[in-house]
């Protein structure tokens, strides 16, 4: 590019335009992981190091509409005190629901289908156990709950010790960084065995569905999940 000075149009001066980059790698990473909360006490260098580590392990995190992960070899299996034929008490009807509640139930059912957590029962399936669902409100948002109380009463208990808080604190004593992560629908990342899906059937106004993943609300889910975590993170825990 050339410019002239004053009225002398013949004398020309060259002028280069230098573009100054305002690219900030830290801001880029913070925008990429804006759902995360990072300590304000970290230095810029520490934040960059942490966020680069998160990006490097990106497949471990659920972002946007990505499919829900599934842990291999950790399918839950339920055992009942009873044998077939099961008592009619376990074949429960759907709860009455208002028009608004039905809309919310349908919305949540479709979300679970899209996540491959449940599937609809076929026409030729023998159905003996059904659990009704209901809608509750929490922080202004609706939640789908399965009333597994009857099924839980007939399920053999699975017990696994809960980690002791003093032991966890001992493991953190020499830590430089402390990180807290929440599993994306953690229970649903465990499958349900082919022998148990017939026990994990829910019923509502639009049909009967069965869980192919471990649902929330069954009595053995916490013990099963804790055992899975203790197995996977054995080296880190002990």
Image (cartoon, helix red, strand yellow):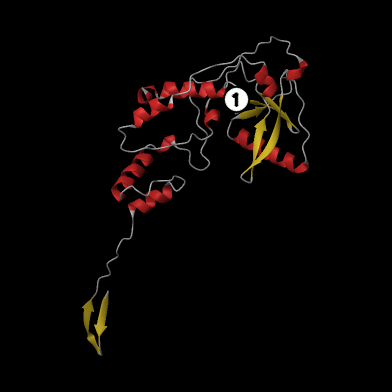
View extreme (bottom): residue? 7
Identified at 74% across, 39% down, the residue is 102
Helix, strand or loop for disc 1: loop
Residue 69: x %, y % from top left: 50, 31
Q: Quadrant of residue 154?
A: top right
Identify the residue at image location x=30%, y=37%. 176
**Residue 92: quarter of image:** top right
The picture places residue 66, in percent across and down from the top left corner, at 51, 38
Tell me the quadrant of the picture where the N terminus can be found. bottom left
x and y, in percent, of residue 24 in the image? 33, 55
Q: Is residue 60 above or below residue 72?
A: below
Q: Mark 1: give few (<14), some (14-19) or many (20+) Cα within 10 Å.
A: many
Please state, as top left, top right, bottom left or bottom right, where the C terminus lies in the image. Answer: top left
Instruction: State the count of labels.
Output: 1
Residue 33 x, y percent position in the rendering: 43, 46
Q: Residue at x 42, y 23 (%)?
A: 232
Nearer to us in this view, 157 or 186: 157
Task: Please name the residue that numbered disc 1 is placed on.
Answer: 212
Residue 191, visible in the rendered structure: no
Q: Is residue 178 visible?
A: yes
Could you tell whether 114 is left or right of 184 in the image? right
Name of the residue lying farthest toward the front: 166
Rendered image quadrant of residue 193: top right
């Amino acid at each position: 590019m050339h410019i002239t000075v004053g009225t002398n149009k013949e004398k020309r001066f060259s002028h280069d335009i230098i573009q100054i980059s305002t690219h900030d790698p830290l801001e880029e990473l913070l925008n990429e992981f804006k759902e995360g909360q990072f300590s304000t006490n970290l230095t810029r260098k520490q934040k960059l190091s942490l966020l680069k580590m998160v990006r490097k392990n990106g497949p471990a995190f659920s972002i946007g509409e990505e499919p829900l992960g599934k842990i291999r070899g950790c399918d839950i299996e339920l055992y009942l005190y009873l044998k077939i034929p099961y008592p009619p008490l376990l074949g429960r009807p759907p709860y009455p629901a208002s028009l608004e509640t039905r809309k919310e139930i349908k919305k949540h059912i479709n979300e679970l289908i899209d996540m491959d957590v449940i599937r609809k029962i076929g026409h030729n399936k023998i159905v003996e156990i059904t659990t009704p669902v209901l809608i509750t409100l929490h922080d202004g948002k609706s939640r789908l709950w399965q009333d597994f109380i009857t099924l839980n009463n007939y399920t053999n208990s699975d017990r696994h010790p809960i980690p002791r808080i003093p032991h966890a604190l001992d493991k953190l004593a020499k830590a430089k960084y402390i990180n807290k992560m929440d599993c994306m629908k953690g229970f649903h990342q465990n499958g349900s065995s082919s022998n148990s899906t017939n026990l994990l059937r829910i019923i509502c106004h639009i049909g009967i569905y069965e869980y192919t993943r471990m649902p929330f609300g069954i009595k053995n889910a916490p013990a099963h999940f804790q055992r899975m975590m203790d197995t996977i993170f054995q080296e880190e825990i002990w």
